[in-house]
Image (cartoon, rainbow, N blue to C red):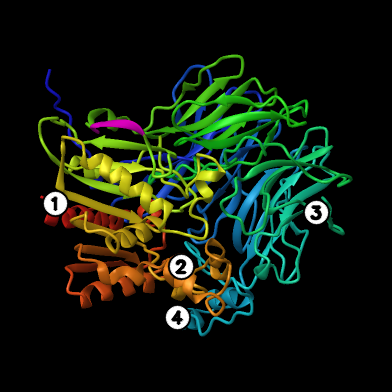
């Protein structure tokens, strides 16, 4: 029986429709979510709300129009849905409210600034949210046509962290906590400080208090990640700080009985390699926080990456059971993101969903009888699934991207192999459609970014596209990433390019030994940390005949202070600035070894990349040019670090075409 399915194309990026976090109604009867699509004419991305019943029936579109409707949340009684939308102004989102049983959406706000996370009050009369107001001079310029045409005159900063990738240059205003009266639309600012950012607000069950996280040090930018929990009266008033333990305290969640606050954090400041753990602290702060997942040795977060993510695969706050005895949370393990639970006392650790794939955003009905969750797999970028807690399997309740049924994606083989230090490593081999084991194929090694992330059971369009061009694509999780415990992630701390390089070369040797691989036609590519490793590799071996280094880290010395990660990037090495330890930063920079390279290399970089500034790519390009090595540079204007995942679709397609063109030039 012949397979007449077509193979995937770069242009298929226009066809994917992606979903947000699914929110189940309080009565458990319906799930609402946002669904994103791409307009191939304008290159704009639009999203609308969709609703699907949890028992029987098909999903139906709930809101319409060429705008961005996102972040839907049910009112406590299930009669209304609040959401954020650009329907009134594509450059300024506002809160909207729509009745579930029929009626038009009405605008709730007239805000000027960036809206962050929000939550309904327990009685359904108010919404608490975080807002970063526009600077007064920005508002003045937007309202004056002459000044608007002249544009920005200057940017003046006193703070160390003044830019952020994907956003650009930050305003002078900070994030603060506000409430919105649902009936009148009146917005009230509860916190205001020139230095402190205050984010991730949540209510106590009685509606009397609001909890959020904030760094309250005199200069938060110089004590990055030193966050604590803060409690204020819901009507406004003096804040009370609850000291937490460790670093990067985030996503507080108050127990239904009001006695505890659960949150996520690492144990120590500046130790990125440590697992994120689940902690609880008494609401009154009477005893120190307790780490509930210290012995789990898997990071309590969603770390599985892909290139088709609208916002469904995100980390959510810890979720309490109605009796305040159990807490639910996500965990990254062996290439999957799973859902687990644990008792409030740190006992009775349970796995709730451990299917191969990614459990992203999830929500329970009021009685905790039903669980709606995002679920993506190696062959599906994401669906809404439903789990009845008395059952052992989730049921898919949406049918999105069914066009993939007519596409031959090839096959994927999972492999476990031993590293240099007898460490266990996991990888995957993606074989082209209509693979013939009697042939010898060119191959491409893909290296993930981060490095504190993992490849795995999540669809990567790029990999399938390259496989469709006739390549065997192989990828793994070398030491330095997440999903395999702290010993695995700590192995490269202070020494990028050592244990990780050894793991990747063993993986490449494993592939070279396969009878279907042409050893003379091996390519390598990766972005961000993967771009770092691509440059590092061509400076240390001539095994690869073609390389594409994307959004690279090439020089730790010049990257110090120029990345949006600012000075804290020194923590991944000796935690010393260049004037105290130039040798370590240079020793682990690919530029120190670029003179050994002879691999033809394409450099791809975005011009608005604030994470790995474009000078990192420029240095590598000019160095390879002066060495007489065949090299080209492709630059994408107006794009951030995450071009391959969230950039303008036509630019993403051009990028893929350049990658395959360059590989074809030397491997075919």
Against 346, residue 119 (above or below) is below
Which numbered mark, 2 or 1, is in the foreground of this view?
Answer: 1
Label 4 SS: helix
Residue 662 x %, y %: 18, 57
Which image quadrant for residue 496?
bottom left
What element does badge 1 sit on?
Answer: helix
Magenta stretch contains residue 163: no
Alpha carbon distance from label 4 to label 1: 50 Å
Cα distance in 3D space between marks 2 and 1: 33 Å
Left or right for 97, reference 384:
right
When the figure is inspected, residue 131 is found, relative to residue 502, above or below; the finding is below
**Residue at 77% in and 35% down:** 255
Residues at badges 4 and 1 in contact (C-beta under 8 Å)?
A: no
Residue under numbered circle 4: 149
Q: Is residue 186 in sight in this rendering? A: no
* Earlier-in-chain disc, 4 versus 2: 4
Tell me, for residue 610, which label it has, or none: 2
The image quadrant that residue 622 belongs to is: bottom left
Mark 4 and mark 1 lie on one chain; the one further toward the N terminus is 4
Q: Which residue is mark 1?
A: 667
Task: Give the side of residue 449 with respect to residue 623, left or right.
Answer: right
Q: Nearer the viewer, mark 4 or mark 2?
A: 2
Residue 470 location (% of width, % of height): 16, 41
Question: Can residue 413 be found in the magenta stretch?
Answer: yes
Element carrying mark 3: loop
Q: Are marks 3 and 1 in contact (CB under 8 Å)?
A: no
């Amino acid at each position: 029986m012949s397979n007449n399915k077509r193979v995937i194309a770069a242009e298929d990026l226009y066809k994917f429709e992606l979903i947000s976090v699914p929110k189940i109604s309080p009565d458990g009867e319906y799930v609402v979510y946002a669904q994103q699509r791409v307009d191939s004419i304008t290159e704009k991305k639009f999203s609308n709300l969709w609703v699907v019943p949890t028992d029987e029936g098909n999903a139906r579109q709930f809101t319409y129009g060429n705008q961005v409707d996102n972040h839907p949340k049910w009112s406590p009684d299930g009669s209304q849905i609040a959401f954020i939308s650009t329907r009134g102004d594509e450059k300024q989102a506002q809160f909207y409210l729509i009745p579930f049983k029929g009626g038009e959406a009405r605008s709730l706000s007239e805000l000027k600034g960036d809206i962050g996370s929000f939550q309904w009050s327990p009685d359904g009369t108010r919404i608490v949210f975080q807002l970063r107001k526009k600077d007064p001079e920005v508002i003045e310029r937007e309202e004056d046509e002459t000044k608007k045409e002249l544009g920005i005159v200057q940017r003046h900063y006193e703070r160390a962290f003044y830019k952020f990738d994907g956003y650009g240059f930050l305003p002078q205003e900070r994030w603060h906590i506000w409430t919105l009266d649902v009936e009148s639309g009146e917005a009230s600012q509860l916190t205001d400080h020139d230095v402190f950012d205050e984010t991730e607000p949540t209510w106590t069950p009685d509606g009397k208090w609001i909890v959020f996280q904030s760094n309250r040090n005199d200069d938060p930018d110089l004590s990055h990640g030193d966050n604590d929990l803060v409690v204020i009266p819901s009507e406004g008033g003096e804040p009370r700080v609850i000291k937490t333990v460790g670093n990067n305290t985030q996503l507080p969640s108050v127990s239904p009985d009001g006695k505890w606050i659960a949150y996520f954090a690492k144990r120590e400041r500046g130790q990125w390699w440590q697992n994120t753990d689940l902690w609880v602290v008494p609401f009154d702060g009477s005893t120190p926080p307790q780490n509930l997942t210290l012995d789990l040795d898997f990071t309590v977060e969603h770390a599985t990456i892909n290139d088709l993510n609208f916002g469904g695969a995100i980390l959510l706050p810890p979720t309490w059971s109605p009796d305040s005895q159990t807490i639910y949370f996500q965990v990254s393990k062996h290439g999957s993101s799973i859902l687990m639970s644990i008792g409030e006392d740190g006992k009775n650790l349970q796995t709730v969903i451990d299917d191969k794939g990614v459990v992203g955003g999830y929500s329970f009905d009021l009685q905790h009888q039903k669980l709606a969750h995002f679920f993506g797999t190696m062959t599906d970028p994401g669906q809404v699934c439903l789990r009845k807690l008395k059952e052992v399997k989730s049921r898919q309740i949406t049918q999105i991207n069914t066009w993939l049924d007519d596409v031959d994606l090839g096959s994927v083989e999972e492999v476990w192999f031993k590293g240099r230090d007898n460490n266990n490593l996991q990888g995957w081999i993606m074989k082209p459609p209509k693979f013939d084991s009697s042939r010898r194929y060119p191959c491409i090694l893909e290296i993930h970014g981060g490095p504190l992330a993992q490849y795995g059971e999540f669809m990567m369009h790029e990999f399938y596209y390259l496989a469709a061009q006739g390549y065997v694509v192989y990828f793994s999780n070398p030491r330095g990433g997440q999903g395999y415990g702290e010993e695995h992630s700590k192995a490269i701390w202070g020494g990028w390019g050592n244990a990780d390089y050894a793991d990747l070369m063993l993986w490449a040797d494993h592939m070279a030994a396969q009878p279907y691989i042409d050893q003379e036609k091996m390519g390598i590519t990766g972005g961000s940390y993967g771009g770092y490793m691509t440059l590092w590799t061509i400076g240390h071996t001539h095994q690869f005949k073609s390389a594409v280094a994307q959004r690279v880290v090439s020089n730790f010395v010049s990257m110090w202070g120029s990345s949006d990660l600012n000075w804290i990037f020194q923590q991944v090495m000796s935690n010393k600035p260049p004037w105290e330890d130039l040798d370590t930063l240079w020793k682990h920079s690919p530029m120190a070894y670029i003179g050994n390279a002879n691999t033809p290399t394409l450099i791809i970089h975005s011009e608005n990349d604030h994470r790995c500034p474009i000078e990192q790519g420029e240095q590598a390009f000019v160095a390879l040019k002066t060495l007489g090595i065949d090299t080209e540079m492709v630059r994408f204007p107006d794009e951030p670090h995450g071009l391959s995942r969230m950039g303008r679709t036509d630019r993403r397609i051009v990028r893929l075409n350049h990658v395959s063109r360059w590989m074809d030039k030397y491997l075919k």
